[in-house]
Amino acid sequence: MDALPLPLAAGGPSLLVVGLLVVLGVLALAFVGAAALALSRWWHLRQSSAEEFRASLDGPIELVGQAQPADDAEPFTAAVSGTECLVSKLDVQVYETDGKTSSWQTRESRTTTRPFVVDTAAGRVRVEPEGADLVLATETVDEIDGGEDATGRTAAVLDALDVKRTSGSVDIGITELDYGDRTRLRESRVDVGEAVYVAGTAVTNDPTVGGFGGPDAVVRERTDRSLAERLFGFPFVVGDGGESAVRWHFLKRGLLFGGIAVVFAAVWTLALVSIL
């Protein structure tokens, strides 16, 4: 006679509850990490000021000034606004509804950059913004209703990014009903000649430095740093809203993520207590 399987211990937590605890714990830890990352950037940036005089351009630096194209770089035309710029971040978003909630979802995101220079009291600094955290206030938004066809520059952008959308109308006799994907293009950028704020690590012993009229230092994303340094070391940031706006951006993000982490941790604690 075959032995009967033993039942699970009575009163023990179900697999569903254990799974819920694991998910809540992972989410809490993820938001703790995101909050620590943002607050680390804020802490580094508040320790100094772009207005401080520097005798040397080597090392961590903050600077403000007008962004002008580097000698070996040409500005490009922004896809949505058509302006000449040096940095552009383009998001193509579609308004989606799942029956209960509606929100804008990003279908495509592209970032384009060109090296630029900023003149400071200590010298001219070349900035290579690829890989930087971008905190950009200058923005152009182009929105297309569901039944509207994309035209001109907007249609060209959607074609270039291979973003497919449906649009049209249905004649129901007394009127026509429009249907299709409600779409918007969000473009944030740094225009030529615009005031910028840059934080990063500058070096002076670089092939791009020196020469007649050349820069005195260069700031770019460093690839020789450890993972801990990349996550929590001095950040590389390019913004166009000023020094205080960039600091507030990271502080706000850190507090938001920290608050969400507290909520998940509280729910995790309540769930754990309920099964003990």
Image: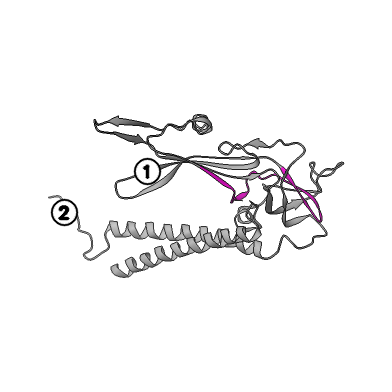
- In this view of the protein, which residue sits in the foreground, 266 or 240? 240
Secondary structure of the residue carrying numbered label 2: loop
Q: Is residue 164 above or below residue 229?
A: above
| Closer to the camera in the image, 32 or 129 | 129
Query: Is residue 98 magenta-colored?
Result: no
Asked if residue 46 lies left or right of residue 154, the reply is right
Residue at which label 1 appears? 96
Residue extending farthest right: 212
Which residue is labeled 2 in the image?
A: 4
Q: Position of residue 212 (x, y in %)?
A: 87, 41
- Image position of 187 with respect to 276: above or below: above
Point out the residue furthest to the left here: 1
> Which amino acid type corresponds to the residue marked 1 in the rendered image?
Glu
Q: Residue at x 28, y 56 (%)?
A: 16
Q: Nearer the viewer, residue 269 or 241?
A: 241
Q: Residues within 10 Å of mark 1 (few under 14, many from 20)?
A: some
Mark with earlier residue (1, 2): 2
- The residue at 34%/45% (across/down) is 97
Q: Secondary structure at mark 1?
A: strand
Q: Which x, y percent locates residue 229?
A: 64, 56
Please indicate, yes or no, whether residue 52 appears anywhere in the rendered image: yes
Q: Nearer the viewer, mark 1 or mark 2?
A: 1
Residue at coordinates 29% horizontally, 67% vertically from top-left? 275
* Magenta stretch in the rendered image: 116-141
- The quadrant holding residue 246 is bottom right
| Residue 276 visible in rendering | no
Q: Answer few, some or many: residues within 10 Å of disc 2's Cα (few below 14, many 20 plus, some between 14 and 19).
A: few
Residue 272: image x %, image y %?
33, 67
Q: Is residue 179 left or right of residue 160?
A: left
Taken as a whole, is the magenta stretch helix, strand or loop?
strand
Looking at the rendered structure, the kind of residue marked 2 is Leu
| Residue 52 placement (x, y as % from top left) | 76, 63
